[in-house]
Image (cartoon, rainbow, N blue to C red):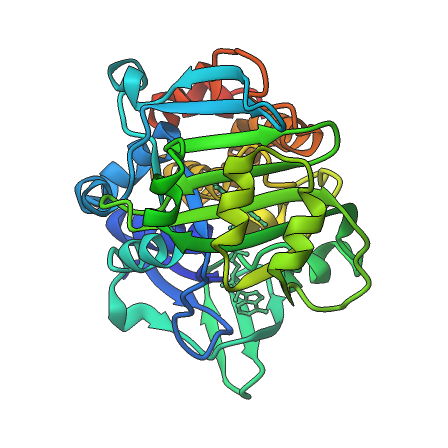
Amino acid sequence: MSEGKRVGVVGAGMGGIAAAALMQRAGFDVVLYDQAPSFMRLGAGIQFGPNVMKILRRLDLEAPLEAVSCLPDYWTSRNWDDGAILANIPLNAERERYKAAYITIHRGDLQQTMLNAVDPARVQFGKQLTRFEDNGKTVRLDFADGTSDTVDILVAADGINSRIREQIFGLDAAVYTGWVAHRAIIPGAAAKAVGADVNAKWWSADRHIVCYYLDRNEDEFYLVTGEPDEWTSASGQLPSTREALRKSFEGYHPMVQAYIDATTEVTKWPLKTRNPLPHWHQGRVVLLGDACHPMKPHMAQGAAMAVEDAAVLTRCLAELGTQDLERSFRTYFACRKDRATKVQRISNANTWLRQPEDPFWCYGDDVYQMDLRAVEATV
Ligand SMILES: Cc1cc2nc3c(=O)[nH]c(=O)nc-3n(C[C@H](O)[C@H](O)[C@H](O)COP(=O)(O)OP(=O)(O)OC[C@H]3O[C@@H](n4cnc5c(N)ncnc54)[C@H](O)[C@@H]3O)c2cc1C
């Protein structure tokens, strides 16, 4: 392996996995580290648009993901009490236009499938990064278990509470937005019995509930909300109850009540964000995903942005090279900052697809069409 090609990716979320897999395919010697003792299957759903599927195609993940996920033709926005349709936005109904599918899937299935694209010999769980030291030539990584490693480039994909971001920019707690998300999975049959939409968001003035199937057979149906609430716990999630959901969505349409009636296990998550950072790298260390631009999840694009970051970063390192790392990192930031900030702003405002609009600028994007050399000339 030639000099400058050893990459440590810290964080095996969607962004880190994508970075590790794409960089391995581009010829880098990558190790993916995560603090979790082993792969954790989070009980939640996720939506991935065509903008991400075009990237996952490069990892041969498109077919396996489509085989297990649900492919909604439309996104439907509904009024909270009478169910009136506010917007019906074509997704897979316009697949040819987007040039890839829009999928909804269980997070665990997505993450495990993506992890299959990384060389298993180069994945290390139980590795909590405590600090790094960049001496200008290499980066030393120190882990909580007392071990250390040395790489040429460190990729921070360690999420909203990024230790690496903290070491570069200083301690700065993520901002609680005043909103929580309840999450629950119910049997698909319970949703079908009341004529559920394949993928819908029910909106009232200050809250919403998003509902979609998680799998090709429509065996599981996922509920995720956005609601104002207090959050005082230091924990990233808490158990909640069906009663709490009932109270929060009192007066909502009978179909929503039927979904809530079918819940058993309900969890509650704080929604946090951060102000945009002035840069995403320092020396031989570079950030991606929630480590540098976390957002409220109301565009369902947070993980998508992390994967897009991973793809553009890989392109910058592979196509522009690692000799002038500063220039490659600056090009990466220049390629990504406007789009990530725009998505973060719209997501935080929670306006996306409430009314009829054309989401092509987001879903139609293909990071492989970007002219890197043209962007590089501007940095
Ligand atoms: C309710 C909700 C719904 C959402 N829905 C969607 C959706 O439908 N579509 C979408 O695209 N996005 C969605 N998102 C956003 C998405 O979950 C995040 O943006 C995404 O997970 C960020 O990915 P990441 O790889 O940057 O970080 P993360 O997924 O947070 O991964 C970070 C990883 O780093 C590890 N780590 C952290 N610190 C250390 C350390 N010191 N050492 C080693 N490892 C460490 C963690 O264990 C973790 O595995 C949603 C978010 C929420 C809250």
Place of residue 92 in the rendered image (x, y in percent of width and height, measured from the top left): 30, 23
Residue 71, by quadrant, is top left
Q: Nearer the viewer, residue 131 or 179?
A: 179
For the view shown, which residue lies furthest in the bottom direction?
A: 146
Place of residue 129 in the rendered image (x, y in percent of width and height, measured from the top left): 57, 73
Residue 210 as seen in the image, left or right of residue 106? right
> In the rendered image, is residue 200 in sight?
yes
- 158 in relation to 50, above or below: below
Tell me the residue at 67%/42% (across/down). 249
- Total marks shown come to 0
Q: Which quadrant is the N terminus positioned in?
A: bottom left
- 167 in relation to 71, above or below: below
> In the rendered image, is residue 288 in sight?
no
Place of residue 272 in the rendered image (x, y in percent of width and height, measured from the top left): 71, 49
Q: Nearer the viewer, residue 308 or 135?
A: 308
Q: Nearer the viewer, residue 226 or 379?
A: 226
Tell me the residue at 71%/62% (across/down). 167
Residue 78 as seen in the image, left or right of residue 152? right
Q: Which quadrant is the C terminus positioned in?
A: top right
Place of residue 97 in the rendered image (x, y in percent of width and height, measured from the top left): 29, 13
Residue 260 as seen in the image, left or right of residue 64? right
Q: Nearer the viewer, residue 378 or 224?
A: 224
Residue 196, by quadrant, is top left
